Image: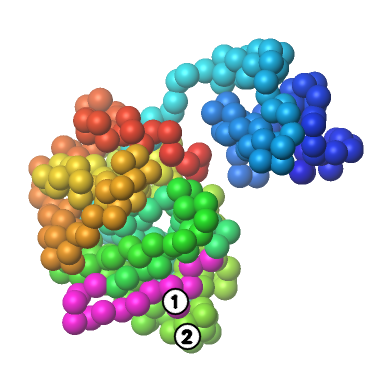
C-alpha cells in the first residue's frame, strides 16, 4: 500500500507487470529497518502475498506469465550476491565473559547507570537462554512487566510472547526461563531488573515497559546491537579470541542459545522445542516438562575455561558445526544488523 501511495498507483488490484517490477525496485531502496533494502527472498514473499490476495478475491493471478518480473527478481538476486556476512553466536561462555564489561561502568556511579546495565544484561540473558529473535524483545510490540508470570516455587518465570515471525495469527506462546544459580542466570537477571528498577521509571508496576532505559525510552534494536558489538570488542581485546565484533548481530543471541544447548549435549528435539522453530513445527506441541527444560538451561549455564574458545569456533570464525540445525532455520533469520 505504501508503494502505491508514494508512486501514485490508483488501485491495488489487477496490477500490470510493469507495476510489479516497480514494486520490486521500490523494495530495494534503503529504509530505517533495512539499510540495504530487502533481500530477494523477502521480496518474493511480498509478491506471493499479492498473488494470494487476488486468488482469494477471485481475481486473476497477477504473477502468472510475468517473465519480465522474473528477470527483475533474478537481477536483484545477482546484485545482492549469495555471500552472507558471518553471524557469530553469543554462546553462554561468551555471555559469561561479557558480564564484567556490562557492569564495569556502573560501579560506584548512580543508580540510573546501574539500571541501564541491568537492562542490557537481562536482554542478553533472556535472548540467549530463551533463543529469542531480537525483534521479539525489542520490536514494535513493547514487552511489559505484565507479560511475565513469576513462579518462585518452581524456580521459573514464564514469559508470554504475544507474537513472533512464525505466529502470523498472534496466538502467542509461553517461554519459560529458569533459575540456574550460575553467573549467567536469566531468572536472576530479569528479577534484578524488575525488582530493583528506580521508582522514577515506574518501579515494579505491571504496565511498565520492561526494557526501558534510564531516559525512560525503550532500548532500540539498533542501539542494542551497537552495545553488543562494543561488548564483543572488549572481550576480544582482553582474551584475544580472534573475534570480529562486526560479525555479531541481533540474531547472534538466538544462534548462541541453540549452539550452547547442542554443545552441552541437549537433543535436537529439545532445542527445536525451546527455540520455537518453524521447521517440524509439530514438535512445538510436545509437552516438555519443567524438569526437562530446567535441566537443559542448567546444562547451558555450565561454563569452563576451555568452553569459551570451543563454543565460539574462533579458528574458523564461524559458528560451530551444528548439523541439520541451521540449514533448516536459515530461511527464518531476521535481518537484524
Residue at 31%, 47% in the rendered image? 282
x, y (%) of residue 146? 45, 78
Report the magenta residues as a range: 142-156
User: In this orientation, which residue lies closer to the viewer: 239 or 31?
Assistant: 31
In the picture, the quarter occupied by the N terminus is top right
**Where does residue 32 sit, x and y in percent of width and height?**
65, 44
- Residue marked by disc 2: 205
Between 245 and 40, the one lying in front of the other is 40
Q: Which residue is mark 1?
A: 145
Residue 58 in which image quadrant: top right
Say if 202 sits above or below 187 in the image.
below
Residue 36 shows in the view? no
Tell me how far mark 2 sits from mark 1, CA to CA: 7 Å
Q: How is the image coloured?
A: rainbow
Q: Given contact means CB atoms under 8 Å apart, are the residues at marks 2 and 1 in contact?
A: yes
x, y percentage for residue 24? 70, 27
Residue 239: image quadrant is top left
Q: Secondary structure at mark 1?
A: helix
Amino acid at each position: 500500500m505504501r508503494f502505491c501511495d508514494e508512486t501514485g498507483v490508483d488501485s491495488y488490484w489487477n496490477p500490470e507487470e510493469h507495476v510489479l517490477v516497480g514494486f520490486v525496485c521500490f523494495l530495494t531502496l534503503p529504509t530505517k529497518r533495512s539499510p540495504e533494502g530487502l533481500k530477494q527472498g523477502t521480496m518474493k514473499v511480498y509478491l506471493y502475498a499479492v498473488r494470494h490476495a487476488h486468488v482469494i478475491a477471485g481475481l486473476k493471478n497477477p504473477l502468472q506469465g510475468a517473465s519480465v518480473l522474473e528477470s527483475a527478481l533474478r537481477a536483484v538476486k545477482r546484485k545482492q550476491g549469495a555471500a552472507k556476512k558471518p553471524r557469530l553466536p553469543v554462546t553462554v561462555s561468551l555471555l559469561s565473559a561479557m558480564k564484567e564489561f556490562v557492569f564495569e561502568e556502573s560501579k560506584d556511579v548512580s543508580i540510573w547507570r546501574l539500571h541501564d546495565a541491568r537492562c542490557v544484561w537481562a536482554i542478553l540473558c533472556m535472548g540467549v537462554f530463551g533463543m529469542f529473535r531480537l525483534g521479539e524483545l525489542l520490536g514494535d510490540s513493547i514487552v511489559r512487566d505484565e507479560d511475565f508470570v513469576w513462579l518462585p516455587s518452581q524456580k521459573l518465570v514464564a514469559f508470554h510472547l504475544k507474537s513472533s515471525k512464525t505466529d502470523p495469527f498472534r496466538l502467542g506462546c509461553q517461554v519459560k526461563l529458569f533459575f540456574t544459580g550460575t553467573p549467567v542466570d536469566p531468572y536472576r537477571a530479569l528479577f534484578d531488573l524488575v525488582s530493583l528498577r528506580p521508582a522514577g521509571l515506574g518501579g515494579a508496576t505491571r504496565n511498565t515497559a520492561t526494557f526501558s532505559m534510564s531516559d525512560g525510552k525503550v532500548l532500540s534494536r539498533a542501539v542494542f546491537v551497537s552495545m553488543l558489538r562494543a561488548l564483543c570488542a572488549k572481550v576480544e581485546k582482553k582474551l584475544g579470541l580472534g573475534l570480529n565484533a562486526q560479525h555479531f548481530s541481533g540474531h547472534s543471541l538466538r544462534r548462541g542459545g541453540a549452539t550452547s544447548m547442542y554443545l552441552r549435549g541437549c537433543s535436537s528435539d529439545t532445542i527445536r522445542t525451546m527455540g520455537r522453530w518453524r521447521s517440524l513445527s509439530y514438535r512445538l506441541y510436545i509437552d516438555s516438562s519443567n524438569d526437562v527444560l530446567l535441566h537443559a538451561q542448567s546444562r547451558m549455564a555450565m561454563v569452563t575455561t576451555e568452553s569459551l574458545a570451543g563454543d565460539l569456533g574462533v579458528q574458523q570464525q564461524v559458528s560451530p558445526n551444528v548439523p541439520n540445525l541451521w540449514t533448516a532455520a536459515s530461511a527464518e533469520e531476521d535481518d537484524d544488523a
